[in-house]
Image: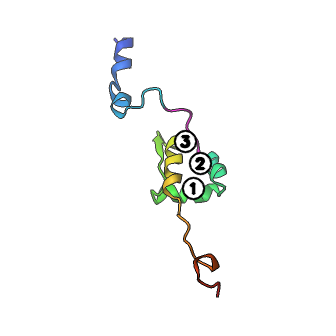
Amino acid sequence: MRTAGNDRTRFKGTAAALGRVGARGPLLDIDAVAEHLGVTARHVRRLVSERRIPFLKVGKFVRFDPGELDVWLDEQRVAPTRRGPLAGGSWR
């Protein structure tokens, strides 16, 4: 006989161990991430297959946490360099 207590404790501690109880909003799918990044869904799938972008597996589905994507995007930032006429160089 199954009780409600058993269902609730089946995954006991999983979310709490990660420190994310109630903190995660709705997850994004590949098409939403592609639109957000301004790239094709095919490109996002390639990033997933190469494990270059943070993602979650929900059963057979690939989903993305918007907060993790924001952190990942910040890590991808490339700092500008001081080249050209302003730095005393030339454009040649």
Q: Residues within 10 Å of mark 3 (few under 14, many from 20)?
A: some
Magenta region: which residues?
24-29
Marks 2 and 1, the one that precedes in the sequence? 2
Q: Which mark is residue 30?
A: 2
Residue where numbered disc 3 is placed: 66
Question: From mark 2 to mark 1, how far is it between C-alphas?
Answer: 7 Å
Residue 25, magenta (yes or no): yes
Is residue 2 in sight in this rendering? no
In percent of width and height, residue 72 lies at 49, 51
Asked whether 41 or 81 is in front, the reply is: 81
Q: CA distance from mark 1 to mark 3?
A: 14 Å
Q: Position of residue 85 (x, y in %)?
A: 64, 80
Residue 27: percent from left, percent from top: 55, 37
The residue carrying mark 1 is: 44
Q: Position of residue 26 (x, y in %)?
A: 56, 34
Task: Find residue 52 and name its label.
Answer: none
The reply to whether the C-beta atoms of the residues labelled 2 and 1 are less than 8 Å apart is yes
Q: Quadrant of the N terminus?
A: top left
Crowd rating for badge 2 (residues with CA inside 10 Å; few <14, some 14–19, many 20+): many
Residues tagged 1 and 3 counted as in contact (Cβ below 8 A)? no
Q: Quadrant of residue 45?
A: bottom right
